[in-house]
Amino acid sequence: MDELNGKMIACQILVTGLIARVANEQRDPLRFLTDFRDEIKAVVKGVNIAGMENTDRVRAIAQQTVDELFSLMKPPSND
């Protein structure tokens, strides 16, 4: 289980870095991040979760993970 958690954290860091890199290349990075976050949340809200008894809990954890990913990103600098 620790190995799986480690891989998930690594994937989260990778995705966060990728999103930040793309956002930095946008004209309005903050708006891009906000729109992207909203799109990801909509996908998580609408994805079909099969084979689980408590899909609401899985969905809530996925939403929380999305929030955590975006909270790791600092606002763009003024430089």
Image (cartoon, rainbow, N blue to C red):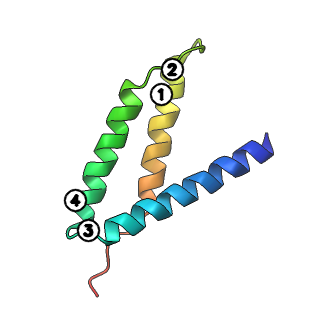
Residue at (36%, 38%) from the top-left corner?
A: 41
In the picture, measured across the screen, residue 40 lies left or right of residue 7, that is left
- For numbered disc 3, what is the local secondary structure? loop
Q: Which of the marked residues, 2 or 1, is nearer the chain's N terminus?
A: 2
Residue on which disc 3 sits = 26
Q: Along the horizontal axis of the image, is 54 left or right of 73?
A: right
C-alpha separation, residue under disc 2 versus residue under disc 1: 8 Å
> What residue sits right under mark 2 in the picture?
49
- The answer to the question of whether label 4 and label 3 lie on touching residues, with beta carbons closer than 8 A, is yes
Determine which quarter of the picture holds residue 42.
top left
Q: Amino acid at mark 4?
A: Arg
Amino acid type for the residue under numbered disc 2 = Ile
- Tell me, for residue 59, which label it has, or none: 1
Tell me which amino acid carries mark 1: Arg
Question: Given the image, on which type of amino acid does mark 3 rest?
Answer: Gln
User: Which label's residue is closer to the chain start, 4 or 3?
Assistant: 3
Residue nearest the viewer, comparing 18 with 56: 18
Disc 2 to disc 3, how far (Cα)?
Answer: 33 Å
Mark 3 → mark 1, Cα distance in angstroms: 30 Å
Pick the quarter of the image with the N terminus: top right
Q: Is residue 10 left or right of residue 48?
A: right
**x, y (%) of residue 77?**
31, 80
